[in-house]
Amino acid sequence: MASIKDYKIKNVETIKKRLDGARAIVLVDYKGITVEEVNKLRNQFRAANVDYFISKNTWIKIALNDLKINQLDGYLKGTTAIAVSKVDEVMPAKVLKKFAETELEKKDYLKFKVGLIGDGIYNPAQLTQLALLPSKEELYSKVLAGINTPATSLVGVMNGVISKLARAIEAVAKKKAE
């Protein structure tokens, strides 16, 4: 039979695996949210490739410290959920902000505590601002559209010049034929 200590060690190791290699770690105060709302939020996080879980603050702290991350220690108090993205730095904040606006009808719960993105610590106001940024895909499409616009304009101008030249040649040919 496994001891309680083994159980705790196993849970800390599981949390470490979930946090290792994270590009963004966002701590969330989930006090007041219902089980149904948590399930909807988890589904939205899952669809965005964000890992969202709730665990004991002590276990989270031990796992973070084992990974040499101690900037979040002071925020591990009270009800804490954690959103982790290994792909997109901004996605945890985007999903959480959108969920709070659409599903919770701007109720005063489910709040950002703090975020760790790269080596930077982001407060709730900064995380909210990050959530307003367009996604990488949106930025890529805007850049490509910006690159494509001059080329499209050039093609349009060239087609116009060529068609005018063709009409002029045709008009001269008709005049000579008369």
Image (tube, rainbow, N blue to C red):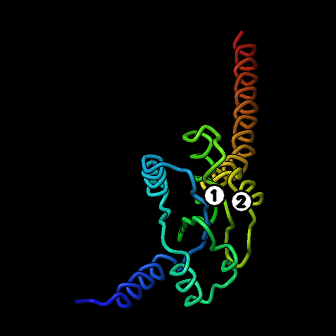
**Residue at image x 46%, y 76%?**
18
For label 2, count other residues whose C-alpha is less than 10 Å away and answer few (under 14), some (14-19) or many (20+): many
**Residue at image x 76%, y 32%?**
161
Q: On the rendered image, what quadrant is the C terminus found in?
A: top right
Q: Quadrant of residue 111?
A: bottom right
Could you tell me the amino acid type at mark 2?
Leu
Does 23 sit left or right of 71 as displayed? left
Cβ atoms at labels 2 and 1 below 8 Å apart: yes
- Secondary structure of residue under mark 2: helix
- State the CA–CA distance, disc 2 to disc 1: 6 Å
Expressed as whole percent of the image width and height from the top left, the position of residue 30 reads: 57, 57
Q: Say which of 129 and 5 sits in front.
A: 5
Expressed as whole percent of the image width and height from the top left, the position of residue 143 reads: 70, 53
Q: Quadrant of residue 3?
A: bottom left
- Secondary structure of residue under mark 1: helix
Could you tell me the amino acid type at mark 1?
Ala
Q: Say which of 72 and 135 sits in front.
A: 72
Does 14 sit left or right of 108 as displayed? left
Q: Say which of 94 and 59 sits in front.
A: 59
Q: Is residue 111 above or below residue 165?
A: below
Q: Earlier in the sequence, mark 2 or mark 1?
A: 1
Q: Label 1, on which residue? A: 93
Q: Label 2, on which residue? A: 127
For label 1, count other residues whose C-alpha is less than 10 Å away and answer few (under 14), some (14-19) or many (20+): many
**Residue at image x 74%, y 41%?**
154
Q: Say which of 13 and 166 sits in front.
A: 13
Single out the residue that lies furthest toward the left. 1
